[in-house]
Amino acid sequence: MPAVPALSYSSFRTYQECPLRWRFLYVDKLPETPRGYFTFGRVVHSVLEELVAPLVVPTARRAGENDRQRTLDEWHPPSGEPIAPRWMTSEELLAAYDRAWSSEGYTSPEEESRYRALGREILLRYYDFLVRERPFPVAVEEHLEARWDGIPVHGYIDRIDRTPAGGLEIVDYKTSRELSSEDARESDQLSLYQVLVENNYSEPVEGLTLYHLRTLTPLRAAPRERADLVGLHDRLGTVMDGIRTEAFEPTPGRHCSRCDFQDRCPEFRSVPAAEAARLRALVDRFEALRAEENRLESELRRTAEELHRAAEELGVHRVPGSRSVAVRRREEAWQFSLDHVRPLLERSGLSERVASGTPEEVRRLVRDPTVDPEVRRKVAETGARQVKWYWELEDASS
Ligand code: SF4
């Protein structure tokens, strides 16, 4: 079995969307066609890193360090020189932008110049905002790794800031068109970053922020509670198991429109011309058989119903045919109205006894002599017995 590489948020999301695409990217390492909006995001991120890096004062305590927080005055870089945060000028910022610019992936010179102008505007406006806000970054573009209860994960965090209360705030820049507060509250990416920061720093994460650069809007969310992270951990575990067992099935969907590997994907590959006629005949035969199967199923149901009516009228359960005997059997099941059962049990503090809500669970409770008889009676009254009749064939000679 191959070793499973540490999962980043984007690798996790890619596998969830389509395991085969994950294999093309992360096992076969096939290149993707550059796209302008990705290039744009990368360039803006790299300029923001250049802008913020001189402001970073790494005062945050690493996991395992003692619990006394270092202050700016106490912190000295390895050279021994005290640190002096330095702000770029806006001209330096634009020069950095020009240096970082890449034309890769744009579909036309017009598109490229539109994006380039947008980038200048975003960076200048964000620069003004940052100068006003004076954040206190403790890390920028930091690569963090962790083993989250057995699952190796990693990620690059755009920025980690010191909060006024002394904790840490995770900031992720977004250059996408639209973003809402719900995105920040539900972002798996921010949840994963919280786990990474908590595993690498010993100070508490106090805030999670998606920073929407186009509108200069910080979308803030509270850190996730333990219980909120369980679902993500389960989904990461499922992805890891899939990768470990090499489960790389194609999963088509809307995302296929931006997949570069359609020519390698069985979902999009055409039948070779030499095989087309043979396979067409097979499909036609399959279609005819499926229609016949449906016709037979409904005829079988009608015949069984007619037999059932006749057996009811005559009060018989065994009906001889020429070669077999049709024997009427019955199956019984109890159904309970959970809408009525649950409030009853909640009032009696017994909700956990019917956690999955199956009829068997409810019937066990009704039979349990340790439960208040009045509760059992009321629960039993919500039940209805359902009887299903069906026919079996026996050999007439047996
Ligand atoms: S074309 Fe669609 S189904 Fe095929 S690999 Fe790409 S994303 Fe997956």
Image (spheres, rainbow, N blue to C red):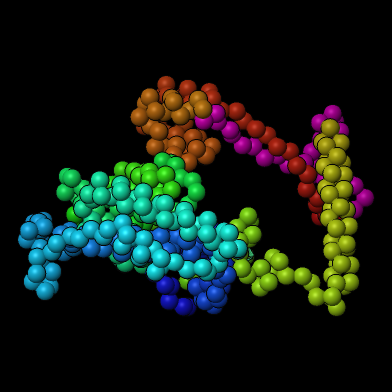
Side of 298 relative to 183 (left or right): right
335 in the magenta segment: yes
Q: Can you tell which quarter of the image residue 286 is in?
A: bottom right
Q: Position of residue 215 (x, y in %)?
A: 42, 44
Q: Can you tell which quarter of the image residue 310 is in?
A: top right
Side of 99 relative to 391 (left or right): left
* Count of number-bearing discs: 0
Q: Quadrant of the image for the C terminus? A: bottom right
The residue sitting at 60% across, 63% down in the picture is 108
Q: Does 291 sit above or below residue 76?
A: above
Side of 6 relative to 295 (left or right): left
Q: Residue furthest right?
A: 322
The residue sitting at 84% across, 75% down in the picture is 273
Q: Can you tell which quarter of the image residue 387 is in?
A: top right
Side of 290 relative to 217 (left or right): right
Given residues 128 and 355, the one toward you in this image is: 128
Given residues 327 and 70, the one toward you in this image is: 70
Ligand 1, what quadrant? bottom right
207 in the magenta segment: no
* Span colored in magenta: 310-338
Q: Where is residue 232 in the image (x, y as percent from the top left)?
A: 41, 54
Q: Does 193 sit above or below residue 25?
A: above
Whether residue 304 appears in this view of the structure is yes
Whether residue 174 appears in this view of the structure is no
Q: Does 90 sit above or below residue 362?
A: below
Q: Position of residue 72 (x, y in %)?
A: 11, 57
The residue sitting at 63% across, 56% down in the picture is 253
Given residues 99 and 394, the one toward you in this image is: 99
Q: Does 17 sit above or below residue 130?
A: below
The residue sitting at 55% across, 74% down in the picture is 31
Q: Position of residue 353 (x, y in %)?
A: 41, 37
